[in-house]
Amino acid sequence: MVRRTLEHALSSQWIDEVFEAQRDKQYTRELLFSSVVDLMGLVALGLRPSLHAAAQSDPDLTVSLAALYDKVNRTEPQVVRALVQGSAERLFPVVQPMKKQGSWVAGYQVRVLDGNHLPASEKRLKPLRNFRGAALPGQSLVVYAPELGLVVDVLPAEDAHAQERALTGPVLERVREGELWLADRNFSTSGILRAVAEKKAAFIIREHGVSPNPSALGEKKEARRGQTGTVYEQAVGVEGESTLELRRIEVHLDEPTEDGETIIRLLTNVPAEKMSALEVAELYRKRWTIEGMFGELEAVLESEVRRLGKPRAALLAFGVAVLAYNALSVVKSAVEASHDLEASNMQVSTYYIAAEVKFTYGGMMVMVEPEEWAVQGEQSAEQLSADLLEMAKKVKPSTLRKHPRAAKKKAKKGYAPGEVVRKHVATARVLKGEKPS
């Protein structure tokens, strides 16, 4: 199922066409860009521990390792972005028939915008070897469609210290009428709010303490109780060439956040007749689905290849991991839909799907001849969707069941002297009743 999905979303011919259309300074000699993506995909899925190992295991690779790494290190960010956008568009009609619950909000398609900083890389590059701090290879703005479970856009940025809000221009160009955008306070600026509103799209964005500093247009009124606190609503306006009239939704929390905040303010242009204040507050809580997606990218897939210190190489690795995530997400949706797991409130784990692929894929590729994978004629997205749903009936959902846990409460340990921290105990003795001293 994963292979068929990947072949549909990322055919070699299509990848090379995207590369030719988007490249600026790069060009193709002997090494096709589709071959680079294939090798990086093996790393992202955990089928090979490194790009070097993936290249060494490929008998058809005709170029040197130096040539391979040179192409990886020079991959232009716009190529990575075009791959993510295009593959998501190819998967839309595949996954849509699998979704029975419909949209989160009637009349809107939800999009979640957030930034993702790549973690520090190994300091293999000569200019970094004497630097004691962390070397950050880059960051990305990510747009997630939670109703479909797909990442629909990634804007890679080589400068890890660039402000997220300063990178939003190209992302905002893709805002479409009928979309509802959720974002945190890093994106709370009058420019971003107006840009979304001008596209006749909706937004729910957490208000920053300083920006955009809207003025009150009416009295604050209590709406009703929510799951986390009391919800209030107020009409506000953002000044400019014209006043942008918005609703401010305030949630007075029963328990403070990790940062000690007791009030969360949300700005939205969704009309009250479409969403009540409480519905706005509850929907914003679902913004954390993108954090779950980031967690799966890190824990399930190799989205953070720390050996790749060059920014463009690290961003390519992250982009290919996103492509792999989308494929696994489609398979997950097929399993959930074919067994109607919504009724039983059972969730399928992306982690166990990836583990099954890792366990089986290598032997399967040895035993199954290449011609066995060939599909007679070009298969449509609708046909692939139907085939995936049929194949998913043979899967036992209990083997892929997700076991969600409540979030752990972070307890501040505070300062402890070195002699206390360096002490150790024998666990066996403690379990027998001996008190650690």
Image: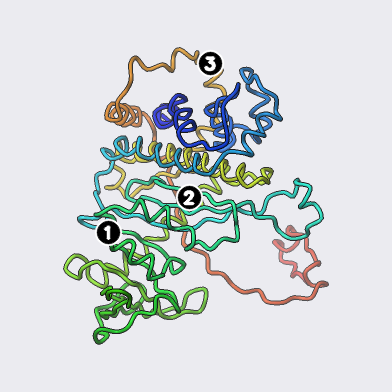
Q: How many marks?
A: 3
Residue positioned most to the bottom: 219
Disc on the earlier residue, 2 or 1: 2
Residue type indicated by callout 2: Leu
> In the rendered structure, which disc, 3 or 1, sits on the residue that comes first in sequence?
1
Mark 3, mark 1: which one is toward the viewer?
1
* Quarter-of-image position of residue 318: top right
Residue 121's tag is none
In the displayed structure, would residue 342 be above or below residue 387?
Answer: below
Residue matched to label 1: 201
Q: Nearer the viewer, residue 329 or 415?
A: 329
Q: Viewer-proximal residue, 255 or 152?
A: 152
Q: Secondary structure at mark 3?
A: helix
Q: What's under tag 1, amino acid-wise?
A: Ala
- Image location (x, y in percent) of residue 56: 68, 25
Q: Are marks 2 and 1 in contact (CB under 8 Å)?
A: no
Which residue is identified by label 2? 155
**Which image quadrant is residue 72 in?**
top right
Q: Is residue 168 left or right of residue 422?
A: left
- According to the picture, the residue beneath numbered tag 3 turns out to be 367
